């Protein structure tokens, strides 16, 4: 029977550490300040943006939300990003995804100054991530590594299979697991014989956004199962893993909610602090 990896509890522990750091920084006249640009009326985005705001407040970090209307043009959004890039008071900028269809999210992300790129999604920071010279880490992937470390689950030499190749989760997590000497496979919608692959995984990550994608028969006995999925089914939240059944086979498993999600928010705050320190000449 798998042990639950309690992301929520770890997020609270990390919270205390970040709070202390922010307190010391603030006392020396440096208060982290970041901005979230949210475009349109995606209901899930509103929930996440609010969660970030609450967390930032709790940690003593200044946060501003720029809520733009659904019909905002790409040019208008770019103008705002350029303004925030130039503002010396602002340490971090992120664009909440998804954005409305008239806007190309890649264009907005690429406009963010890499020194202020909280999500680590600019080409510059993705390149640094794969080179191992990064100063900012993608939040969800970073949270997953923190969770494995906290429970003393070794990564070195393990076979990790990630289902999902998104820029925001799958690809950056592959980079961070590789950095920790895992043998990494990225599986996706065109992968042949998915089950054959997943059954070999010591660490299996599901990051697709499809409820019950990972079933018991796909999991090796004793595997560590990380569920990044956030699916709303009949008003409640489920991940990508058939939790109740997979739990029986896994050695460790993350729940949804209360697993990776809370760590993502916590990790974003860590990145804001890291960027702020760097901008003020601290390592
Ligand atoms: N530029 C950008 N950066 C992101 O990091 C980003 C994004 N866009 N767009 C959407 C996804 C999703 N995401 C989550 C954050 C927190 C929870 C979270 O706290 N989940 C709670 C439950 C929250 C609830 O009840 O809805 C949990 O799993 O326990 C989930 C998902 C960040 N994202």
Image (spheres, grey):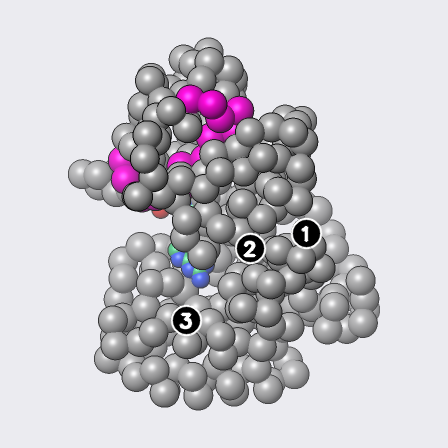
Q: Quadrant of residue 131?
A: bottom right
Q: Quadrant of residue 39?
A: bottom left
> Residue 38, relative to residue 241: is it above or below?
below
* Magenta-tinted stretch: 199-211
Q: On the picture, is 248 further left or further right than 6?
A: left
Q: Identify which residue, 132 or 271, lies in the foreground.
A: 132
Instruction: From the image, state whether disc 2 or disc 3 is nearer to you.
Output: 3
> Residue 175, relative to residue 127: is it above or below?
above
Q: CA distance from mark 1 to mark 2?
A: 17 Å
Percent across and percent down for residue 37 are: 42, 72
Q: Is residue 208 magenta?
A: yes
Q: Residue at x 41, y 64 (%)?
A: 96
Can residue 115 be seen in the rendering of this structure? yes
Residue that label 3 marks: 106
Q: Do the residues bearing badges 1 and 2 touch, measured as CB atoms within 8 Å?
A: no
Q: Residues within 10 Å of mark 1 (few under 14, many from 20)?
A: many
Q: Residues within 10 Å of mark 3 (few under 14, many from 20)?
A: few
Q: Kindly give the residue lying farthest to the left in the view shown.
A: 234
Q: Identify which residue, 24 or 217, lies in the foreground.
A: 217
Q: Earlier in the sequence, mark 1 or mark 2?
A: 1
Look at the numbered disc 1 and give the secondary structure of its residue: helix
Percent across and percent down for residue 259 are: 47, 35
Q: Earlier in the sequence, mark 2 or mark 3?
A: 3
Total count of labels: 3
Residue that label 1 marks: 18
Q: On the picture, is 212 further left or further right than 268?
A: left
Look at the numbered disc 2 and give the secondary structure of its residue: loop
> Residue 105, relative to residue 220: is it above or below?
below
Q: Identify which residue, 148 or 129, lies in the foreground.
A: 129
């Amino acid at each position: 029977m798998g042990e639950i990896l309690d992301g929520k509890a770890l997020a609270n522990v990390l919270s205390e550490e970040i709070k202390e750091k922010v307190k010391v920084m603030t006392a020396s006249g440096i208060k982290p300040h970041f901005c979230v640009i949210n475009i349109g009326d995606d209901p899930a985005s509103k929930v996440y943006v609010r969660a970030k705001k609450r967390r930032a407040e709790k940690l003593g970090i200044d946060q501003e939300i720029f809520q733009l209307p659904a019909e905002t043009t790409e040019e208008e959004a770019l103008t705002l990003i350029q303004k925030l890039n130039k503002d010396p008071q602002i340490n971090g900028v992120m664009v909440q995804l998804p954005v409305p269809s008239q806007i190309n999210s890649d264009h907005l992300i690429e406009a963010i100054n890499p020194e202020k790129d909280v999500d680590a999604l600019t080409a510059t920071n993705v390149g640094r991530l794969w080179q191992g010279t990064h100063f900012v880490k993608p939040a969800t992937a970073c949270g997953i590594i923190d969770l494995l470390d906290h429970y003393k689950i070794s990564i070195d030499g393990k076979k990790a299979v990630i289902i999902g190749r998104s820029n925001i989760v799958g690809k950056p997590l592959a980079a961070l697991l590789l950095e920790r000497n895992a043998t990494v496979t990225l599986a996706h919608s065109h992968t042949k014989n998915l089950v054959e692959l997943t059954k070999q995984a010591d660490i299996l990550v599901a990051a697709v956004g499809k409820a019950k994608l990972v079933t018991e028969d796909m999991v090796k006995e004793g595997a560590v199962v990380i569920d990044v999925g956030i699916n709303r089914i009949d008003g409640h939240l489920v991940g990508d893993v058939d939790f109740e059944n997979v739990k029986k086979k896994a050695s460790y498993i993350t729940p949804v909610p209360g697993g990776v999600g809370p760590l993502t928010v916590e990790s974003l705050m860590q990145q804001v602090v890291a960027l702020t320190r760097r901008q003020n000449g601290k390592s």
